[in-house]
């Protein structure tokens, strides 16, 4: 039969055990304290969040730490300090830091590793390191997703000064184009996009312009797809006219056909759409014209959200070659890590605390992905520049050291393989730049642009 604890444990022999129990009990208390009658119900939310945090730490770590301290007969004060720090409410000390920050990724990932690759690595790519100007021009209205903030010229210069070579500008053209032929794009909106592209040019940044968040095209029934394709062709027709090769060099402004085709656009639909859009952008003579200097460079990803493994389903027209096309992939895996706490993803709050520490087993699936992409690209008639057009970790709930580690790992592993990239994104929920403080987030910028 179970016996009350006080009859099993000896206060004289293990005094610190009792102290520990009291400290932990007090630390987690969030109802009425039956000793003092004080009601501390208001602490419940905070306590819940600290318990969630503790769940991210191996129970063994806490247990081992407690055992060690008890064996060494540390004072109750020291022991309570340790517990206090494990809960994240004390000033950082060595124990709290190693327990809170168990990232094991090698420091070399935060250094510049061009020379990992004897062919020259990142320097060989056209696009190098880039940033997505996400949540601005693909929001329903600029400012709506960025707390009223809109892009200014300083943003582009700041990005260039930090060492980035490219910006990807997601644009929701579908919210600014007529629904009927010739699908005229609102002139004020077009002028705004030209203004931002001009600022990027002034800052000597390369630009990728895309069609982002054409969500109706993805979600309307199959029967409406033909209409959406005509509209998308109309949008690209106008973009080609508004951004002529004579004013925007073919390899300084890149057209990305459609962001993350998905849902009702299946693999076959997408292959067919690619062929149609290329004749719009490159003209009817697309197949003959593929010398890579008189054609706008285009960027193409796969259907099913541009996931790397779906490259296998991509069927590229014969007019596509390494001089006129860059292939893009998007990568956010493990999704429960990168999107933990993401407000727009169902169930993402349940993933809070998912860890990526850079252990061998954390790294393995990511390296396997890179290797599969490299194998795809090594096949006949390929050898494209591969651009990781989106990768990133949502900042709200993630441990910043783990966010830094994952980000640096993807960036450096890409660079080793001559892949260029653009982090998602500049100054919003994943943001490398903190617009409120007016400064780069130190850990993210160190992960993205290592100190030489
Ligand atoms: C979407 C963004 C989203 C990001 C990460 C992008 O493709 O456009 O809205 O924040 O992916 O999920």
Image: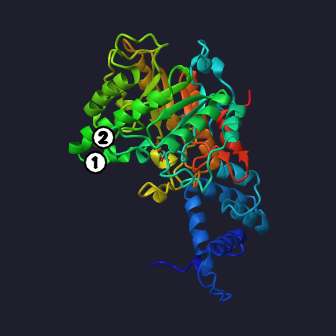
- Residue 450 in view (yes/no): no
Residue 196 in the figure: left or right of residue 351: right
Name the residue: 72% across, 72% down.
15
Name the residue: 58% across, 34% down.
197
Viewer-nearest of labels 1 and 2?
Answer: 2
Furthest residue toward left: 223
Question: Is there CB contact under 8 Å for labels 1 and 2?
Answer: yes
User: Residue 236's image quarter?
Assistant: top left
Foreground of the two, 58 or 428: 428
Q: For the residue carrying disc 1, how many other residues have a C-alpha within 10 Å: few (<14), some (14-19), or many (20+)? A: some
User: Residue 423's image quarter?
Assistant: top right
Name the disc covering residue 426, or none. none
In the displayed structure, 123 sits above or below 58; it is above
Mark 1 highlights which residue? 220
Mark 2 highlights which residue? 228
User: What x and y, as percent, mark residue 346?
Assistant: 41, 57
Quadrant for the N terminus, please. Answer: bottom left
Foreground of the two, 234 or 135: 234
Element under label 1?
Answer: loop
Name the residue: 53% across, 24% down.
419
In the displayed structure, 392 sits above or below 58; it is above
């Amino acid at each position: 039969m179970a016996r009350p604890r006080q009859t099993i444990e000896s206060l004289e022999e293990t005094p610190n055990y009792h102290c520990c129990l009291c400290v932990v009990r007090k630390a987690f208390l969030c109802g009425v304290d039956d000793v003092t009658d004080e009601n501390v119900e208001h602490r419940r939310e905070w306590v819940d969040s600290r318990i969630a945090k503790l769940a991210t730490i191996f129970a063994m770590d806490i247990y081992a730490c407690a055992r060690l301290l008890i064996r060494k007969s540390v004072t109750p004060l020291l022991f309570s300090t340790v517990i206090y720090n494990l809960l994240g409410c004390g000033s950082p000390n060595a124990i709290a830091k190693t327990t809170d920050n168990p990232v094991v990724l090698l420091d070399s990932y935060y250094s510049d590793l061009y020379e990992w690759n004897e062919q020259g690595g990142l320097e060989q790519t056209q696009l190098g390191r880039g940033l997505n100007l996400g949540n601005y021009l693909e929001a329903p209205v600029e400012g709506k997703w960025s707390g009223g903030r809109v892009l200014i010229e300083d943003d582009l210069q700041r990005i260039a000064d930090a060492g980035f070579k490219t910006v990807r500008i997601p644009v929701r053209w579908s919210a600014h184009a007529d629904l009927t032929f010739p699908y005229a794009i609102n002139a004020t909106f077009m002028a705004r996009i030209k203004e931002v592209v001009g600022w990027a040019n002034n800052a000597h940044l390369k630009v990728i312009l895309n069609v982002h968040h054409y969500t109706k095209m993805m979600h309307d029934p199959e029967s409406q797809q033909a209409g959406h394709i005509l509209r998308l062709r109309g949008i690209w027709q106008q973009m080609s006219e508004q951004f002529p090769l004579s004013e925007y060099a073919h390899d300084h402004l890149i057209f990305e056909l459609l962001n993350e085709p998905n849902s009702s656009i299946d693999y076959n639909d997408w292959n067919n759409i690619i062929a149609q859009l290329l004749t719009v952008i490159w003209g009817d003579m697309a197949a003959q014209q593929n010398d890579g200097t008189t054609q706008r460079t285009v960027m193409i990803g796969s259907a099913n959200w541009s996931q790397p493994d779906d490259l296998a389903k991509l069927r590229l027209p014969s007019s596509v070659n390494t001089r006129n096309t860059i292939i893009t992939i998007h990568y956010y895996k493990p999704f429960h890590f990168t999107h933990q706490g993401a407000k727009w993803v169902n169930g993402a709050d349940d993933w809070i605390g998912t860890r990526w520490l850079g252990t061998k087993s954390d790294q393995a699936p990511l390296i396997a992905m890179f290797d599969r992409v490299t194998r795809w690209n090594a096949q006949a008639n390929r050898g494209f520049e591969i651009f990781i057009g989106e990768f990133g970790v949502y900042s709200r709930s993630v441990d910043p050291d783990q966010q830094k580690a994952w980000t640096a790992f993807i960036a450096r592993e890409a660079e080793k393989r001559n892949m260029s990239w653009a982090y998602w994104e500049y100054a919003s929920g994943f943001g490398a730049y903190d617009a409120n403080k007016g400064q780069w987030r130190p850990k993210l910028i160190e992960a993205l642009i290592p100190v030489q």
